[in-house]
Amino acid sequence: MKFLSSVFAYAPPSGGTAPPGVENINTIVTWVLWAVGAILFVLFIVGLVQAAQARSRGGQADASAPVWPLILAIVLGASGTIWNAIA
C-alpha cells in the first residue's frame, strides 16, 4: 500500500504546460494522422468500387473487405483526438 501512495504522490499535476519544442512534434503527428486517414478513406472507396464491380459482373462481392479501412480510419481519428487531448 505504501508503494501506491508514493506513486500517487509523484503523479504530475493535470493542466500543466507542454515542454518547449513539442509544437513541431504535434504538427508532424497531426499531418501524419491526417495523411493516413485520407489514404484509408481512399482504400475504403476503392474497396466499395471493386465490390460493386464484382457484383455487377455476377460474381461474389465480399462486403467486409472495404469496411476494414473505414474501421481503421475511425480508430485513427480517435487516436488523433486522444493525442490532441494529451498534448
Image (cartoon, helix red, strand yellow):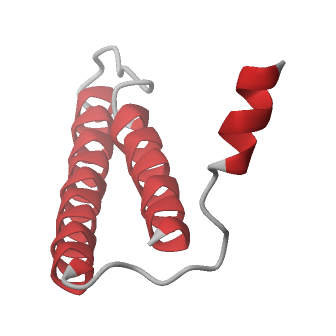
Front-lying residue, 36 or 6: 6
Which residue is located at x 27 percent, y 76 percent? 26
Snapshot quadrant of residue 48: top left
Snapshot quadrant of residue 47: top left
- Residue 12: x %, y % from top left: 60, 60
Classify 51 as above or below 73.
above
Farthest residue, direction right: 1
Q: In the rendered view of the protein, which quadrant contains the N terminus?
A: top right
Which residue is located at x 28 percent, y 16 percent? 59
Which residue is located at x 27 percent, y 63 percent? 33
Which residue is located at x 29 percent, y 60 percent? 37
Farthest residue, direction top: 60
- Residue 20: x %, y % from top left: 25, 85
Viewed as shown, does residue 17 lie left or right of 60? right
- Residue 68: x %, y % from top left: 39, 32
Viewed as shown, does residue 55 lie left or right of 32? right
Viewed as shown, does residue 85 lie left or right of 35? right
Classify 83 as above or below 87.
above
Front-lying residue, 33 or 39: 33
Viewed as shown, does residue 71 lie left or right of 27? right
Q: In the rendered view of the protein, which quadrant contains the C terminus?
A: bottom left
Front-lying residue, 42 or 12: 12
